[in-house]
Structures are given as structure tokens and as C-alpha cells.
Image (tube, rainbow, N blue to C red):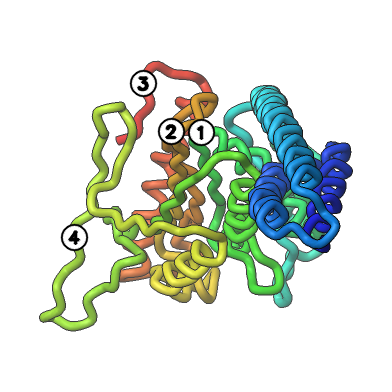
């Protein structure tokens, strides 16, 4: 008798839930499916264990009622799944229109606060005129104005920065390749923006959490692979592979950039580790950061002496509406441009600065060609 009551209550509860569609997610649909699977076993127990005063006919009637309830729930689930798929299509369309309107290449400017001990006299070297313009004061009566897609003032938070980046992150789960990088002079806060601190995480940590959260809420199954490398003095170095500490230690495999048959870019021998949640990805990220090439200069106590690249490869099967079956999102913390007169670098530090400046100049040429839609883009 108790089993029959619980079966009726379960059916009533599910039917009441089905009327609530304003916050439907694929996780909710899955939970209803799981509940639904438990109903037949209860129905079987009712049919096999009739109690005193309950006829076989009434038991069969109860079983039929439960079957009808299950059938109705299955029909509702089909409708809800179609509803979610339609919402996903609309979301992708809106996101694509938003990104097209904003432009495929967007440039933000984040003004670093003046640190303790820095003195510029009465002049503030950089000032935000509004949300898209920056004033650079070169002398008392000389200044220049620069325009950007977005300007973050010195008091801007990591949350504000990520809010502008998040739409690009979300487009990666729809099969679009994306790249986010921090560019600027040494000591301007690029690593803080990308890496952040435990109390104030940067773009990479926030992006990882957002990607995996959206993947859980999606009605598709994704496979994620994490890789991390740096470009130091023009050479590629895998940051997830232990580096030799003794002369007799084996050397890690050489990394080289190749073009695959589909025209995509691949890095031979780069380690790709499968991750299932943001915690695993962030542990690998922190491990890779600990192996980065850093050193002290006159401009920055812990200056990045290389370009750090984080790659998250996203594969989704049986999703024909996606742009690609496998796509990649890159996060790049570039080494800072330097002036020898300011850093007073020599020896190894000087060679590192020259390599960084040369590569940043080449990157500027590539971005300029992409922005102008030139036929030839000088990647090499």
C-alpha cells in the first residue's frame, strides 16, 4: 500500500514539475529521467505483492495508470529536449551576431595603477578619457590620444575584465577557435590580468570555470585536452614535461609547428592531458606556471622572459550544428617589450629582451594583416 502511495506521489510531483519550464536545463531533464527509471520497479512490486483487500484488477489498473504517467512524462521530455535545443540555437545566433557586431579582433586597454615608489611628478602618464579613449601625456604641452574597443581604468576589477572576455569564451563551445592574449611593456601587469592571484583570479582561471560550467549545462558531451608551452629565445618548450636537471637526464622531445592536412596548425610532440573539470585544468595550469622562465630586471622583479601559451582543445561528437568537431581556445601571456636604456639588461637578459621584442614586432605585423584582411599574412 505504501509503495502504491509513493508511486502516485512521484507521478504527481513529476507532473507538477513539468509545468515549471522557465528555468529548464539539460541537467533538470536528466534528473527527471533518473526519477522516471525508478517507477517501473515500484510498479512491479505493486503487481507482485498485492496486500489484503486489494484485488488483482485494481493492481493492474494501478500499473496501467503508472505506465500512462510514464508515457506522458516521456512525451514531455521529448518536447523539453526540443525546447532546449531550440534555445541553444537561438543563443548561438545571438552570440554570433554580438561577436560580429563587436568585431572578430578586439583590443582592450587596461591601465595599471601607479605602484608605491613610482613618481611622475604632476603629470599622470596615462589617463582614461572615457570607456574607449586613452590620453598619453608625453610632456607638459604634448600628448596623444588612442582609441580602443574598451578601456579599463586603474581601479577596474578582474570581474570587469572577464565580463568583456566571456562571450568569446562561450563561443568556443560552439566550435569556434578563439585566442585571448595580454600584450604590453614589461611590468604593466599582463601576468596579473591573465594569471591573477588566489584571492583575485585572472582571465585563465575564470575562463576555465566558465567553460566547464557551460559544458555541464549543455546537452552535448565534450572532451577537453589541456596543453601548455612557452616560447623562450625563439624555441618551444613544453611546460608539462619535466625538464632535465642533470647532464645525463634525457632531453624532452623537440616541439615543432606543422600544418595538418585540413590546414590547421599543430605542434608535434606537445603533451595534451585530458581533463574533466576546471579543478584538474587549473592544477595543470599552476604546475606549468611554476616552470616558466622568469628573472629580475630593473623594470620588474619577476619579469616573464618568455611567451606563455595555454591551449584547451575541445571535441564534441554528434553535434552537427557546431562549427567544428574539434576546436581550440588559446590563452597567451606574452613577454613584455623592453628598452635597454630602461632595463639596463646585459648578457642573457639582453638576449631574452631582443628575442621578445623581435617576436612582438612579428606578431604586430600578423595582427595588422588580419585586420586589413590582406591576402598574405606573415605568420612565419
**Mark positioned earlier in the residue sequence (4 or 2):** 4
Within-10-Å neighbours for mark 3: few <14, some 14–19, many 20+: few
Q: Which residue is mark 2?
A: 325
Tell whether label 1 touches label 2 (CB within 8 Å).
yes
Identity of the residue furthest to the bottom in this view: 246
Q: Can you tell which of label 4 and label 3 is closer to the viewer? A: 4
Residue 48 tag number = none
Q: CA distance from mark 2 to mark 1?
A: 7 Å
Distance (Cα) linking label 4 and label 3: 32 Å
Which of pointers 4 and 3 lies earlier in the amino acid sequence?
Answer: 4
Labels 2 and 1: the sequence-earlier one: 1
| Residue placed most toward the observer, 141 or 49 | 49
Q: Is residue 114 left or right of residue 252?
A: right
Q: Which residue is mark 1?
A: 175
- Tell which of 342 and 229 is nearer to you: 229
Alpha carbon distance from label 4 to label 1: 30 Å
Q: Which residue is mark 3?
A: 376
User: For the residues marked 3 and 1, what is the alpha-carbon distance in whole angstroms?
Assistant: 25 Å
Residue at horizontal 75 percent and vertical 33 percent from the top: 72
Amino acid at each position: 500500500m505504501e509503495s502504491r502511495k509513493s508511486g502516485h506521489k512521484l507521478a504527481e510531483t513529476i507532473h507538477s514539475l513539468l509545468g515549471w519550464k522557465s528555468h529548464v536545463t539539460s541537467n533538470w531533464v536528466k534528473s527527471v529521467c533518473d526519477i522516471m527509471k525508478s517507477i517501473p520497479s515500484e510498479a512491479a512490486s505493486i503487481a507482485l505483492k498485492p496486500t489484503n483487500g486489494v484485488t488483482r484488477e485494481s493492481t493492474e489498473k494501478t500499473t496501467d495508470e503508472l505506465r500512462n504517467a510514464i508515457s506522458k512524462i516521456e512525451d514531455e521530455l521529448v518536447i523539453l529536449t526540443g525546447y532546449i535545443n531550440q534555445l541553444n540555437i537561438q543563443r548561438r545566433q545571438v552570440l554570433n551576431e554580438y561577436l560580429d557586431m563587436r568585431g572578430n579582433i578586439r583590443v582592450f586597454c587596461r591601465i595599471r595603477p601607479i605602484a608605491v615608489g613610482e613618481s611622475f611628478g604632476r603629470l599622470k602618464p596615462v589617463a582614461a578619457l572615457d570607456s574607449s579613449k586613452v590620453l598619453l601625456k608625453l610632456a607638459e604641452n604634448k600628448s596623444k590620444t588612442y582609441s580602443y574597443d574598451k578601456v579599463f581604468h586603474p581601479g577596474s576589477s578582474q570581474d570587469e575584465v572577464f565580463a568583456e572576455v566571456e562571450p568569446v569564451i562561450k563561443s568556443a563551445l560552439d566550435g569556434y577557435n578563439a585566442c585571448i592574449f595580454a600584450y604590453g611593456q614589461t611590468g604593466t601587469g599582463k601576468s596579473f590580468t591573465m594569471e591573477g592571484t588566489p584571492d583575485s583570479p585572472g582571465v585563465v582561471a575564470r575562463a576555465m570555470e566558465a567553460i566547464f560550467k557551460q559544458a555541464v549545462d549543455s546537452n552535448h558531451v565534450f572532451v577537453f585536452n589541456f596543453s601548455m608551452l612557452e616560447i623562450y629565445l625563439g624555441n618551444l618548450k613544453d611546460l608539462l614535461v619535466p625538464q632535465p636537471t642533470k647532464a645525463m637526464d634525457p632531453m624532452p622531445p623537440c616541439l615543432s609547428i606543422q600544418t595538418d592536412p585540413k590546414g590547421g596548425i599543430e605542434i608535434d610532440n606537445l603533451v595534451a592531458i585530458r581533463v574533466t573539470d576546471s579543478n584538474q585544468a587549473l592544477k595543470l595550469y599552476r604546475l606549468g606556471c611554476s616552470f616558466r622562465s622568469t628573472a629580475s630586471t630593473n623594470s620588474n622583479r619577476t619579469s616573464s622572459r618568455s611567451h606563455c601559451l595555454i591551449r584547451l582543445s575541445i571535441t564534441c561528437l554528434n553535434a552537427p550544428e557546431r562549427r567544428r568537431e574539434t576546436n581550440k581556445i588559446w590563452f597567451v601571456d606574452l613577454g613584455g617589450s623592453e628598452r635597454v636604456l630602461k632595463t639596463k639588461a646585459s648578457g642573457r637578459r639582453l638576449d631574452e629582451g631582443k628575442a621578445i621584442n623581435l617576436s612582438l614586432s612579428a606578431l604586430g605585423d600578423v595582427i595588422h594583416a588580419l585586420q586589413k584582411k590582406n591576402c598574405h599574412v606573415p605568420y612565419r
